[in-house]
Amino acid sequence: MSYGDGTDTKAHPAAVRGAASAAPTATATELLDALLEQLAQARAHTMRGQLAAKGEAIARCIHLAGRLRAHLDAGGAPALAPRLAPLCDDARRDLQQASLHNNVGLIDGVTQGFEAIRDELD
């Protein structure tokens, strides 16, 4: 089978299978990276007392945690799911509380949990 981009699955079946199996973890990694970036932004805005920017950053974090959880629920990154799925659920709750109470400690706790998993992927 050949795709319009010149990929020939008969000539390179192992490469195609490898890319297909790597894709779910790659998607999870991209979502984790985006989430960690937004967590850093949320922390910085909270520390500076920039309430509107903090709220927007935390909303993006909650959205990304939801997207990551949906990716896991759809079968993406099954090796990560047992640890990452509950972390996503806890993060969404903790980030709502962090936003309500301007609590940097909660943001830091969420960040540490996701960083631990992200570091294992390197």
Image (spheres, rainbow, N blue to C red):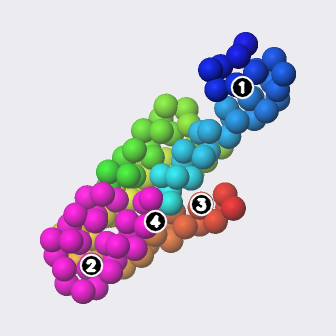
Q: Earlier in the sequence, mark 3 or mark 4?
A: 4
Q: Which residues are magenta?
A: 34-61
Three-letter amino acid code of the residue under disc 2? His
Q: Earlier in the sequence, mark 3 or mark 1?
A: 1
Measure the C-alpha gap from mark 3 to mark 4. 11 Å
Given contact means CB atoms under 8 Å apart, are the residues at marks 3 and 1 in contact?
Answer: no
Give the residue drawn at x 70%, y 16%: 2
Measure the C-alpha gap from mark 4 to mark 2. 14 Å
Q: Earlier in the sequence, mark 3 or mark 2?
A: 2
Q: Describe the element under mark 2 as helix, strand or loop.
A: helix
Q: On the image, numbered disc 2 is attached to which residue?
A: 45
Q: On the image, numbered disc 4 is attached to which residue?
A: 36
Given contact means CB atoms under 8 Å apart, are the residues at marks 4 and 2 in contact?
Answer: no
Q: Position of residue 60 (x, y in %)?
A: 30, 57
Mark 3 or 2: the one toward you: 2
Question: Is 110 covered by the magenta stretch?
Answer: no
